[in-house]
Image (tube, rainbow, N blue to C red):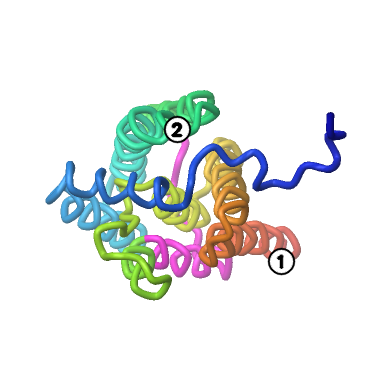
Amino acid sequence: MSEWWTYRLEDFLLFSPRVYWRMFELANAAFWPLQLLTLAAGLAIVLLVLRRPRRHGLWIALVLAGLFAFVGWSLLWRRYAAINWAIAYVAPAFGLQALLLVFGAARGGLAFDRRDLAARLGLLIAVIGLVVYPLLPPLFGRPWASAEVFGIAPDPTAIAALGVLLAASGVLVPLLLAIPLLWLLLSGLTLHAMGDPQAWLPLLAAAATVAAMTLRRIAR
């Protein structure tokens, strides 16, 4: 019997890259044209952060909550867990994220009022999740049907949420950042185990978020 330290990350992979990306193809086909609505919701969130109309924090939190709940149920629980049993234990974290967002909205504990360098970097991160991620498939030799779209797929949803939350203030913000960060770490490691060149993207987004938070602390 091999010792545990002789195992590599890919030894724990329960599915092939083809099965993984096929999952997104099937999800996109099943939900089309919902992608147009989720992308519009994401762009609306960015506009709300920029313009800050009355009660903008409430609407941003509620929309993000709905999208996290939907992705956790429709993609992670119903599809991803079918090819990776461990995701059944991860999917509830997206539900928890939704509950935290609703709680923050109900208590008025979230205000997207930061205008520092970290917040501006956050908006750039959000745009990457919203606009860049759906355009990646041809760059990595995959069909358009496998595109990861905000509000449908977990990675762009987590990335855009992190970017938006960097513009937020409130006691719940550290908790709200934790779940998307941990998800991107898990996703990046999974893609790395698959040998996928896209693995660096979720890890880079997580690192950029941590760097922005660090800059904010230094600037205080």
Looking at the rendered structure, the kind of residue marked 2 is Phe
- Label 2 element class: helix
- Label 1 element class: helix
**Residue depicted at 42% across the width and 61% down the height:** 126
Q: Single out the mark in the foreground, 2 or 1.
A: 2
- Span shown in magenta: 107-129
**Residue 122 lies in the magenta-colored region:** yes
Left or right: 126 with respect to 190?
left
Q: On the rendered image, what quadrant is the N terminus found in?
A: top right
**Residue depicted at 35% across the width and 42% down the height:** 64
Q: On the rendered image, what quadrant is the C terminus found in?
A: bottom right
Looking at the rendered structure, the kind of residue marked 1 is Ala
Residue 4, percent across and down? Answer: 83, 34
Residue 166, percent across and down? Answer: 52, 55
Mark yes or no: residue 87 visible.
yes
| Residue under numbered circle 1 | 219
Q: Quadrant of residue 195?
A: bottom right
Residue 14, percent across and down? Answer: 54, 37
Query: Eyeballing the image, is 88 above or below 126?
Result: above
Residue 99, percent across and down? Answer: 42, 26
Q: Quadrant of residue 74?
A: top left
